[in-house]
Amino acid sequence: MQRWLAANEGVFCEPASAAAVAGALRHGVEGESLVCVLTGHGLKDPDVAIENAPPVIACDPDLAAVERAVLN
């Protein structure tokens, strides 16, 4: 759920916070409003972020090199 929230909602929360959303989606709340409070940032558990992140792209520390790395 942590990965889904980051990819689909732009919310990078810790795994324990994502559990609230997972439970809400699993058990449903048809026709009702529901608020899930995500209290922790995803970087509280950096190992999960590192394991799921794409590999680092190495480049020289100048704007042209960064643009080439990002845009290609």
Image (cartoon, rainbow, N blue to C red):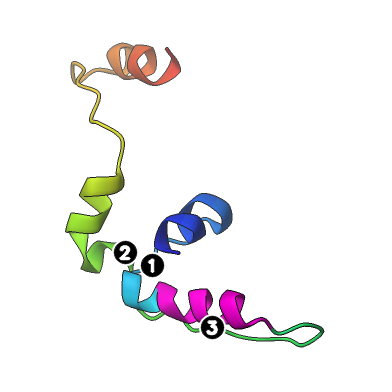
Amino acid type, label 2: Gly
Q: Which residue is mark 2?
A: 42
Residue 21: % across, % down: 52, 76
**What is the residue that sits farthest to the right in this orientation?**
31
Amino acid type, label 1: Cys
Amino acid type, label 3: Cys
Q: Earlier in the sequence, mark 2 or mark 1?
A: 1
Residue 45: % across, % down: 21, 65
Task: Report helix, strand or loop for mark 1.
Answer: loop
Task: Report helix, strand or loop for mark 2.
Answer: helix
Provide the residue span drawn in magenta: 18-28
Q: What label does residue 57 carry, if any?
A: none
- In this orientation, which residue lies closer to the viewer: 46 or 28? 28
Q: Is residue 62 magenta?
A: no
Is disc 2 in contact with disc 1, using a CB cutoff of under 8 Å? yes
Q: Which residue is mark 1?
A: 13
Q: What label does residue 36 carry, if any?
A: 3
Placement of the C terminus among the 4 image quadrants: top left
Q: Earlier in the sequence, mark 2 or mark 3?
A: 3
Query: Residue 36's image quarter?
Result: bottom right
Query: Residue 39's image quarter?
Result: bottom left
In the image, residue 1 sits, relative to residue 35, either above or below, namely above
Graded by Cα atoms within 10 Å as few (under 14), some (14 to 19) or many (20 or more), the crowding at tag 3 reads few
Task: Report helix, strand or loop for mark 3.
Answer: loop
